[in-house]
Image (cartoon, helix red, strand yellow):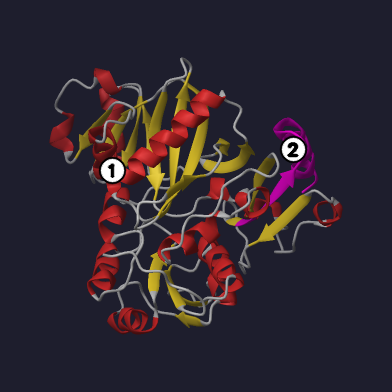
Amino acid sequence: MASKVILPPAMLGILGGGQLGRMFANAAKNMGYGVTVLDPDSHAPAADFADVHLCQSFTDPAALQYMASHCAAITTEFENVNADSMRWLASQGIPVSPSGDCLAIAQDRIAEKTFIRDAGLDVAPFLAVKNAGCLDTDLSAYLPGILKTARLGYDGKGQIRVKTLDDVRFAHAEMKHQPCVLEKMLSLHREISAIVTRTRAGEIACFPVAENEHVNGILDVSIVPARVSPALAERARSMAMQLAEKLDYIGVMAVEFFVLDNEQLVINEMAPRPHNSGHYTLNATLTTQFEQQVRAMCGLYPGKTDLLSPAVMVNLLGDAWQDDGSEPNWEILMTAPNTKLHLYGKKLARPGRKMGHFNVLAASADAALEQANAIKETL
């Protein structure tokens, strides 16, 4: 499809109305665009900023037809949206980013890891376990490892650590013998991520690399700039951009990496959308990842990604809320002049649910991390 510049006040569509959709809608509205959100949740956070909320499933024919008729371009906020819906919208002549084909690859760990490996980029040793018969072989190259469902796992879900062949068989049975990936566990030094933006014209930009710490499989803290060598950070950015080009990817994509003890860099996975580890960009870079999402889908040149200040992003989970649903005491956050609170407008707090985040900007990443940890202790 030829590059087409879409300017305000055009209507932009997004499939998915969670917090990423909410922040996309806010960015688009600030830039002068209209926003249509398709999400079956009547309380979808993105609906607060949308001109139109289509409260229907992602495969509803009438809702998809409405988007095709009213939206100048369409994107999504999560990878598990129906890829065929995105393909159908593209078939109607609407610029759709990312493509349904890219989403289909990201939705399946077997396809994803195979594509990354075939693109000449390093991944952890893995075995595609399409059925129980795939386990009738020597698994020593992949053990100890992690058995992961090929589809729908996120934030640590759909994963079981395994040490022996019996462990693998038991775990596969626990997962009801669905297709999985058996991935060798590696000796990790750090986990980092790079968020890349690519347009239809092939223009590409990458944000500063974030260092990520997880708790119970959920991102807890992102530290920017990552505490790695400049050469390693640049290699991560280069690998992320290379993957985007191999995919012919349009839009914003996060690429997560494992940094091994020998400074080897391997790709863990990709997310075809803005990413939790990029929330620091809301305050710490010249352009946010959500403005980049708008710019990419509208055929605009990517904004500059300069880091204005070292920053630390901290996720706020429902665990911080009181049992009666009352909010944490935000006073320390709201009174500190170098902190920025972002809440997602979710009505119900529950353990493990992402309710918001805050960013701390400071003279150094270490100073920001020290302050962020102190604030966490008060919540």
- For residue 215, side relative to residue 162 (left or right): right
Give the residue type that dot 1 points to. Answer: Lys
Residue 195 in sight from this viewpoint: yes
- For residue 15, side relative to residue 68 (left or right): right
Q: Distance between the residues labelled 1 and 2?
A: 36 Å
Q: Which of 135 and 186 is in front in this view?
A: 186
Q: Which class describes the residues within 10 Å of circle 2: few (<14), some (14-19), or many (20+)?
A: many
Q: In which quarter of the image is residue 368?
A: top right
- For residue 125, side relative to residue 35 (left or right): left
Query: Disc 2 on helix, strand or loop?
Result: helix
- For residue 134, side relative to residue 236 (left or right): left
Q: Which of marks 1 and 2 is nearer the N terminus?
A: 1
Disc on res. 368: 2
Disc on res. 246: 1
Q: Give the range drawn in magenta.
A: 355-379
Q: Which of 112 and 240 is in front in this view?
A: 240
